[in-house]
Image: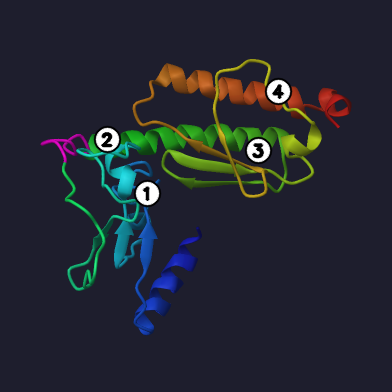
Amino acid sequence: MPEEFLRELRRITQAHGILLVADEIQTGFGRTGTYFACEHYGIEPDLITVAKSLAGGLRWPPSSARRRSWTLRRPAVSAGPSRQSGRVRRRAGELDIMDDAFFARAREIGDRLRAALNALQGAFFSGCEVRGLGAMLAIELAAKTAPHRRSASWKPPRAGLLLLKAGSGNVLRILVPLVIEDAELDDALAILAESFEHVLAPSNTKATR
């Protein structure tokens, strides 16, 4: 989200005594290049949800929060009544890998992704947006050029790439594992470029309408 939006939201919530909750279940623990995405905005929320991001997607103890609504809170915020069962248990040293090099790698992956998406934007689209933080990016395609609107069945020339849709189906979300090797990332970006070329290149316009 735009930085100005979140800063204004923090101002309003503080002015009226409202708790600000940051949902970091997907963005937490390094994916965006910092421990939590809210750090990019320079604001401190009252509550941060973490749940399975505590263990990279695993839902079961001992390495993740038991409840989907498990949160971190500022000391000044009272926990109040709770239905949480059990305690969060984790192996010793589980978070030790999250050092400066770990976060730098997330930012490096994000820089390479953003450069690739900007290149696709320049080649095939106008007025589309590339946005996101670190290794969690998206490209929003204009409705008239979105692949699902140009072809009844958008089939890439070769398989091997799994992406997520968002918005009205015209947003491609890219969430890259931070353990990805450079060669794997290069191959994934090549498949993505080939897919856009296959569907949206001028020579294929008639075939995909």
Q: Residue at x 51, y 36 (%)?
A: 174
SS class of the residue under badge 4? loop
Residue highlighted by disc 1: 25
N-terminal label among 1 and 3: 1
Q: Secondary structure at mark 3?
A: helix
**Magenta stretch: residue 93 in it?**
yes
Asked if residue 62 lies left or right of residue 15, the reply is left
Foreground: disc 2 or disc 3: 2
Q: Earlier in the sequence, mark 2 or mark 4?
A: 2
Rendering coords of residue 78 (x, y %): 21, 73
For marks 2 and 3 on the same chain, the one whose residue lies earlier in the sequence: 2
Residue kind at label 1, given as amino acid type: Ile
For the record, the magenta segment spans: 90-98
* Residues marked 2 and 4 touching at CB (< 8 Å): no
Taking the image as shown, residue 37 lies to the left or right of residue 158, namely: left
Taking the spot 14% from the left edge, 36% from the top edge, the residue there is 91
The residue indicated by pointer 4 is 155
Q: Secondary structure at mark 1?
A: loop
Q: Tell me the distance, in whole angstroms, between the alpha carbons under discs 2 and 1.
A: 18 Å
